[in-house]
Image (spheres, rainbow, N blue to C red):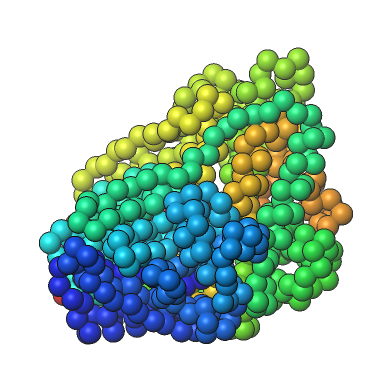
């Protein structure tokens, strides 16, 4: 994990701007930094900057920019299958000077060009430059685990970086806020944010996941997609499906454990992190240390299940109690580093865990991001599955099974009807729950109905694919990366392994839920490594907490601070905000909205200061 940045312009980069940019990359890469500059054949000036967090091949020989045989590479991430690629390249006659994945990436590019992207399994964002032709290529991994932002300022240059604060340093300017993105955040929440690659800054966009941007000398940039997930179910039995998943899952977790530093696992009370920890420790025999957040609110308290998981693991565990003081200071720190508000309250908790991981001397952690989206773990997934299974002769038994399992815990009123998507297959009102009421808080009413892209005709799999590439996973990866990088911790997501995901999307949907349990294939894969009390738990577990756990909104001094004059009130009605602060926040959706209002207020103030 590292930081990358670059600039392509008609004039050289000033030393002052370079120095500021490099200083802002330090937390992403405290173990080293470097720069490369040249003039391309078309006369444009190119600068490439890098800061290193050493995870694989800790020797300085793998420092970047990595230059070899007329090629220059800056790279953020990990190529998990680098040993296998290295062996293939050696058979083709390639020679290596290092033992890490950086040189493998460069040699793979020399051998296969854009075709190398299809061979690589991992998380990455990189820029690679060919000195003879002047071709610069930017590329991003399949799911967008590693960030890459782009700001095209026309005659002033093209800028790219792992973080927006570095873009602004290179450009010497701060973009205006993107009002549409702010409205989406406040009214529709995180699921409405990532579909068109916008950011909270006007004109700054993300390079899309699974794409490469090729910039030939003297030519306009060309964006190319190199991978697309499809649903192609094979006619296989439940036993064959389980065997395929077991193999792919073990391979995926083993790959993400490749490192030359100690490994931390973010352990909750849920299935996802426990399977990772169980597989790593019991099956693969690696030493791991677990880190867990503890919330006192009974609705979110996972301590009992965490204790059960630890009984089966017998590994060190650091438990983090959520502090009840200093919340606003920490949130301001997050916002300054995130270049925006945290997209969900859960990532305040991830930030706390990452800080503890850092303080204990670790810089690599694994978590369960993506498991729900690939194994089918959300409450609405079960109802989409029922809609797909409606022609089965045992359908009424399936309904009864839902009532005795996931159905017991559903709070969303629309999802309390097991036939919801049989009766209204296109209804997605539950996704932007409360949006109409939240819109009333804005100075200018906003409404943007949920739009689902059509990837396939299977109703469950289409929903899962939207979450995987357009809605939930991009948001989680965005905040996963920043919450870790604030503390120089690399977060890895084993469940987003290319081969595992493609395996799961080759299986008929009927195998995803069995014996009235969603994520059945993952539960079964964990047998013998994870206690059954966790694997058989029908209730969805996840890291969460209400904002009222951290903040006393009845405090007069706090209310005065939050209601003071601010550009925030160009977006939000002050009187409604004041009334909401004084209300009884009991519903989970209201707590999430209050957190969004609070985070947005602090971010707008921060942005205003940057623009002064």
| Residue at the (28%, 76%) spot, across then down | 37
> Considering only vertical position in the picture, is 484 above or below 436?
below
- In this view, the residue farthest toward the front is 93
Between 490 and 595, which is closer to the camera in this rendering? 490
Task: Residue at 28%, 84% (x, y): give it.
Answer: 19
The image quadrant of residue 353 is bottom right
Q: Position of residue 128 (x, y in %)?
A: 39, 64
Left or right: 452, with 578 as reference point: right
* Side of 160 relative to 147 (left or right): left
Q: Closer to the camera, 261 or 525? A: 261
Q: Position of residue 489 (x, y in %)?
A: 54, 74
Residue 402 picture quarter: top right
| Residue placed most toward the observer, 380 or 71 | 71
Q: Is residue 495 above or below residue 558?
A: above
From this viewpoint, which residue is outermost toward the left? Answer: 155
Q: Can residue 307 be spotted in the picture?
A: yes
Q: Going 15% across and 58% down the picture, which residue do you hit?
A: 154
Indicate the position of residue 392 as horizontal and vertical percent values. Answer: 72, 17
């Amino acid at each position: 994990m590292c930081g990358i940045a670059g600039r392509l312009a008609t004039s050289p980069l000033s030393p002052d701007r370079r120095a500021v940019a490099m200083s802002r990359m330090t937390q992403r890469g405290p173990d080293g930094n470097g720069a490369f500059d040249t003039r391309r054949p078309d006369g444009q000036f190119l600068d490439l900057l890098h800061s290193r967090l050493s995870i694989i091949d800790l020797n300085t020989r793998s420092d970047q920019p990595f230059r070899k045989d007329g090629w220059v590479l800056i790279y953020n991430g990990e190529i998990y299958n680098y040993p296998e690629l290295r062996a293939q390249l050696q058979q083709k006659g390639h020679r290596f000077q290092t033992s890490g994945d950086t040189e493998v990436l460069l040699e793979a590019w020399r051998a296969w060009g854009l075709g190398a992207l299809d061979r690589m399994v991992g998380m990455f964002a990189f820029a690679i430059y060919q000195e003879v032709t002047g071709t610069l290529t930017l590329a991003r991994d399949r799911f967008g685990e590693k960030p890459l932002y782009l700001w095209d300022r026309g005659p002033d240059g093209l800028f790219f970086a792992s973080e927006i604060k570095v873009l602004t340093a290179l450009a010497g300017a701060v973009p205006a806020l993107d009002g549409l993105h702010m409205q989406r955040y406040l009214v529709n929440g995180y699921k409405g944010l990532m579909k068109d690659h916008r950011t909270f800054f006007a004109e700054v966009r993300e390079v899309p996941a699974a794409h490469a941007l090729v910039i030939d000398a003297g030519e306009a940039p060309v964006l190319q997609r190199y991978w697309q997930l499809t649903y192609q179910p094979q006619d296989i039995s439940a036993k064959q499906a389980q065997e395929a998943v077991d193999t792919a899952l073990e391979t995926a977790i083993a790959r993400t454990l490749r490192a030359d530093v100690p490994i931390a696992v973010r352990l909750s009370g849920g299935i996802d992190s426990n399977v990772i920890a169980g597989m790593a420790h019991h099956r693969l025999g690696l030493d791991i240390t677990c880190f867990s957040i503890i919330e006192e609110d009974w609705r979110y308290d996972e301590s009992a299940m965490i204790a059960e998981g630890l009984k089966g693991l017998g590994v060190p565990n650091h438990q983090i109690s959520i502090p009840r003081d200093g919340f606003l200071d920490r949130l301001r720190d997050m916002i300054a580093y995130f270049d925006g508000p945290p997209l969900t309250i859960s990532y305040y908790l991830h930030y706390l865990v990452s800080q503890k991981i850092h303080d204990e001397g670790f810089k690599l952690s694994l978590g369960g991001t993506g498991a729900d989206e690939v194994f089918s773990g959300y409450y609405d997934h079960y109802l989409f599955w029922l809609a797909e299974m409606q022609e089965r002769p045992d359908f009424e038994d399936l309904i009864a099974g839902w009532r005795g399992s996931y159905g017991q815990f559903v709070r969303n009123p629309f999802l309390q009807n097991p036939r919801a998507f049989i009766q209204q297959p296109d209804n997605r009102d539950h996704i932007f729950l409360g949006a109409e009421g939240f819109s009333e808080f804005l100075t200018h009413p906003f409404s943007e109905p949920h739009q689902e892209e059509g990837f396939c005709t299977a109703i469950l799999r289409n929903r899962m694919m939207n979450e995987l590439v357009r809605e939930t996973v991009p948001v989680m990866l965005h905040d996963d990366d920043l919450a870790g990088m604030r503390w120089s911790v690399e977060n890895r997501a084993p469940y987003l392994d290319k081969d595992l995901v493609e395996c799961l999307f080759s299986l008929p949907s009927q195998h995803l839920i069995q014996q009235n349990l969603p994520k059945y294939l993952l539960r079964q894969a964990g047998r013998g490594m994870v206690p059954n009390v966790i694997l058989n738990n029908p209730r969805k577990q996840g890291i969460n907490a209400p904002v009222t756990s951290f903040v006393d909104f009845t405090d007069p001094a706090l209310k005065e601070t939050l209601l003071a004059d601010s550009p925030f009130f160009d977006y939000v009605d002050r009187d409604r905000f004041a009334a909401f602060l004084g209300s009884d926040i009991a519903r989970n959706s209201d707590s999430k909205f209050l957190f969004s209002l609070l985070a947005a207020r602090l971010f707008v103030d921060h942005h205003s200061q940057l623009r002064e």
